[in-house]
Every structure is written in C-alpha cells, then in structure tokens.
Image (tube, rainbow, N blue to C red):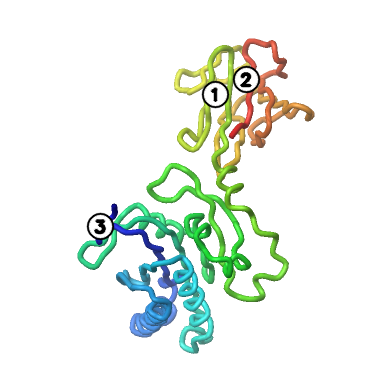
Amino acid sequence: MPTETDLQRAILFADVVGSTRLYSLLGDAKAREVIAVSLQVMAEATEACAGTVIKTIGDEVMATFLTPDDALSAATKMQERTNMHPLLQADEVRLSIRIGCHFGRVTFEERDIFGAAVHAANSVTSEAKGGQILATVAVIERLSADWQWAIRQIDVATLKGRTEETALYEVHWQADDVTGMLPSIDVASVVSHSRQRLRLIQGEREWVIDEQCPMVTIGRGDQNEILVKGDLISRQHARIEMSKGRFSLTDLSTNGTFVKANGDPEQFVRRDSTALAGSGVIGLGESPEKDMPLVIRYSVTR
C-alpha cells in the first residue's frame, strides 16, 4: 500500500522555449520580467485546474495533478494564455512554451517530488517543440472520453532512465490543429508495435533484437556480436538496430549486403540502410540462398 509520501500523480513540466535568445534580444532586466510573467501564467493555470506547483526551476515549472484530465486542462490553459498575453506576444518577444506530461508513482519529500515518473515527464518535455503539449501512454489511457478528439500519436521515444520505448502523443489545444488530422491510433496497438522483436538465426545460433538489446553488429572481426567468417565479409560488415519500434540494417562493408524478404525482390545495400520487416534472409557480400552456411535468417515477431 502506498504511504502519504508515495502516491500516483500526473506530473507536468512546462518551460520557456528560447530563453537564452530573450536575454540576448531584450537584455537581462526585460527578459527576467517576461519570464516571470510566463511563470505566473503557468502557475495560475495550474491552480485553476486543481493542480499544485511543486517548484520553479529557472524558466520551468513542475506541477502535479490528481488526474490526467486536470493536467491536460492546465496545459491547454497555459498554451492559450501564453498565446494571448500582450506582454508575451509583443513584436520583440513572441514567447512560446513547451509542455510534457506523464502519470506514475512519485515520492513526496520536503515539498518536492522524486521518482522515475518525474524523470520521464521531464524527458517528454524535452521532446516537445514550442507551442506543443506531449503526453505518454500512461496519461492517454487514463483520460476521459472528452479528451479523445484532441489526442494523436506522433512518435515513439526512449525516455530518460528507461530502456523500453514508449509512444508519445500530442495534445491539440487549438481548433485549427484538429482539422485534417488522421484517425486516432489505438493505444494497445502502439504499445504492441513498440514491443516487437527481431529474431536472427545463423546456423545453430540465434540472437534477439528488442527493447533490452536494440543493436547488434555483424562481421568477421572478434568485436562483433554476430561473428561470421568469410572471404567476402568485412571485419565490421553491417549493423542491425531497433529504433522507434522498427528494425533496420545498415551496411558498413566493402562488398555490400543482400536482403531478400519473403515475397519481395532482393535488395542490394552498400554503405546505406534498409528496413527489415516480416521475414527473410540476409547475405553478407553475396546473394543469399537459404541452404548457404553463412546466410542469416530473420523474422519480426511479437
């Protein structure tokens, strides 16, 4: 059971984009005034949505909320009020903020909060652009139906302190942003996609590329994870890696790499990359045949 200092919360970070430019453009005194106004806008939006400002760090606010709905309501108010504030949108300023939100367990200690969820929320914010609100699956799956119209999945990323990838969602806070957006992406399908694995088999050996082991190198040099000896194989011949839930092969060799996916024409890759999907075979330096001793078979599974 969680104690009073160990509870689940929606954690929100909001910070000013380009504050260094403001100091250069406006001078120290004016820039400090503008940033102070921005921080006040963030704090007022937090309090208006039943949130708690934990602290301000330079040009950044960290806040917590009981529910993801409250957190995104506050984030929307922050963006709207920043976009309308005369001091923050003067011709010489045009200030923008970026916001990230995550939901998880936090530890309260001396008016501060700690934990992996805090680092994740901060990491999400660093992925956002000015004028953008980003949230994780942990937030999205707990939202009420009222918010679903405004949510679209845009990317997957590995957050600070974590090894697995997570889907990132943008929260559209302006009516114009919603026009022409693609249909919502099912959360379960996104998570499932990010949990795919790539199996590699060469002879009697097998390797798996997934969130825990996202990359292997192949070649005849002893430093490679997949050691394959052959006259046409370079010391470091190729690299196979997982990024954003997808798999790719990058050739690093002299003689190139051949990839033949089942049902597709053979590809020749040299000093370039290609996607790996479904199943097929890989030939190092020569066209692969399934019964060749040096061929590598691959398949993408869940």
Question: What residue sits right under mark 1 in the picture?
Answer: 218
Among the two numbered marks 2 and 3 on one chain, the one whose residue lies closer to the N terminus: 3
Callout 1: SS: strand
Among the two numbered marks 1 and 3 on one chain, the one whose residue lies closer to the N terminus: 3
Question: What residue sits right under mark 3 in the picture?
Answer: 3
Residue at (39, 67) in percent of width and height: 66
For label 3, the crowd category at 10 Å Cα-Cα, with few meaning under 14, some 14 to 19 and many 20 or more, is: few
Q: Amino acid at mark 1?
A: Ile
Q: Amino acid at mark 2?
A: Ile
Question: What residue sits right under mark 2 in the picture?
Answer: 296
Quick check: marks 1 and 2 in contact, CB under 8 Å? yes
Q: Amino acid at mark 3?
A: Thr
Residue 282 percent coordinates (x, y): 66, 23
For label 1, the crowd category at 10 Å Cα-Cα, with few meaning under 14, some 14 to 19 and many 20 or more, is: many
Residue 33 percent coordinates (x, y): 36, 84
Dot in front, 1 or 3: 3
Question: Number of numbered discs present?
Answer: 3
Residue nearest the viewer, comparing 57 with 163: 163
